[in-house]
Amino acid sequence: MYAALFSLVLSKFDPEDAHHLGALVIRAVGNTVFRSVKAGATRASVSDQVQTLGLHFDSPFGVAAGFDKDATLVAGLGALGFGHIEVGTLTAVAQPGNPRPRLFRLVSDRAVINRMGFNNGGAAAAVPRLTKLRTQKNRPVIGVNIGKSRVVAVEDATADYLVSTRLLAPVADYLVVNVSSPNTPGLRGLQELDQLEPLLTAVKAECGSTPLLVKISPDLTNDEVVRISKLVVRLGLAGIIATNTTLSRDGLNASQAAVELAGVGGLSGAPLAARSLEVLTVIRTVVPAEMCVISVGGVENAADVQVRLDAGATLVQGYTAFIYRGPTWAWQINRGLARIRAVR
C-alpha cells in the first residue's frame, strides 16, 4: 500500500514538503493510543535488544540524525519501533539552512541528495523538549547530534561546539560531534587530526558523564579512518558513527541530467551501502570490541541490518529508506531480525 501511495502521491510532492507532511503523521502517532504499540508488535525480540553506552536499546535499529532536527518527532518514531532517535544536527545559533530546493530524490537509486545546511531552531530551543522527553516512560534512547553554526568561523568552532555541549549534554542520552556533513563550509576540515583532537578533547571535558561519539565521513581514506579511530580510542570517547553522506556520484542509475539538476550536496541511501560497510570494517580492526560503533548508510531491510551487526556494528541507523519504505519500516526490520535470528 505504501509503495502505491509513494508512487502515485508522495513522489509528486517536493521532497521537503513530503517530509513535513510525514512529520505531521508521526507527531500524531506520538500523541495517540498508538504509542502503546511500542510495547508490542513494533518492538524487536529480546535477543535483539542491546546494552551499550551504559544504556538499554529495545532494538539495534534507530533513526539517524537529520530526520528529526529539532526533537519534535521522538515519541512518534519510538512508537513506530525505532530503538533510538538521534536528533539534530543542532547548532548553538539557530539557522534556516540553505535556500530551497535543497532535498532531491533519486528514485531509481533509492537515494537522496541533500544540502539542507543544518536547518534547526538552535540548541537552547531544543532543551525544554528534550528535558520533557527524558521523563517519559517507554521512550526510545535519545542521542543528540551537534554541529558548527554556519555564522561561526572554523577557527572558532570549538567554542561554538562547547556552547551546544553545555546546553545539550545534560539532556542527551548520548552526544555526537558532527564534523562530517558536506553542507557547512569548512566543517569536514575539522576531521584533520590537528583540529579534531583539541575539539574532541574540549567537548569530552565539558560533556561530563554523557557518552560522547564522533560522526565521520565516508569520503575519508581508509588510512584517515584508522587515524581517527586510534584518536577516539586514545581520548577515551564512547564510540564512532560511520558514516555521514558522501560527495561521490559514482555508480548511480539516475541520468546525468537528474544528478546535475540535484546539484551539490550529500548523497545518502543505497549507493552508500558498500562504502559504509567498508568503513565499519576498517574501524573494527582498530577499536576495542566493547566500543560502540554505529553503522549508517545504505541500510534498507533486516538483512542489511544483520550484515552490519555481523560486521561488528553495535547499533545500526537509517534515514533515506524511510522515504521509500514508509512508516512500517522499523517494524519490518524488527520482525525481519527476529526471523533471521530464529533460523540461525
Image (spheres, rainbow, N blue to C red):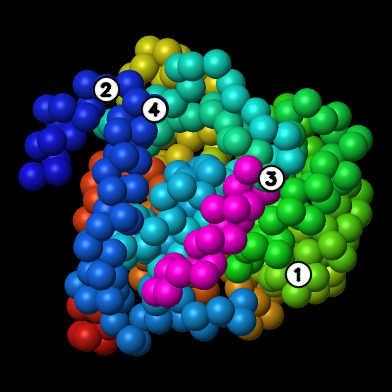
For the point 64% across and 63% down, the residue is 171
User: Can you say whether 179 is above or below 299 in the image?
Assistant: above
Mark 1 and mark 2 lie on one chain; the one further toward the N terminus is 2
Which residue has dot 4 on it?
Answer: 16
Helix, strand, or loop for circle 4? helix
Label 3 element class:
helix
Mark before the other along the chain sequence, 4 or 1: 4
Position above or below: 90 against 101? below
Q: Secondary structure at mark 2?
A: loop
Q: Are marks 3 and 1 in contact (CB under 8 Å)?
A: no
- How many C-alpha atoms fall within 10 Å of the one at disc 4: few (<14), some, or many (≥20)? some
Residue type (three-letter) at the residue carrying disc 1: Leu
Camera-nearest residue between 152 and 268: 152
Please state which of the two labelled residues, at mark 1 or mark 2, is closer to the viewer.
Answer: 2
Residue of label 2: 13
Residue under numbered circle 1: 237
Q: How many marks?
A: 4
Q: Amino acid at mark 3?
A: Ala
Task: Inspect the image, locate mark 2, and give the three-letter code of the amino acid beneath it.
Answer: Phe
Q: Dots 1 and 2: beta carbons under 8 Å?
A: no
Looking at the image, tell me whether mark 3 or mark 4 is earlier in sequence order: 4
The magenta stretch spans residue 85: no
In this figure, which residue is indicated by the disc labeled 3? 124
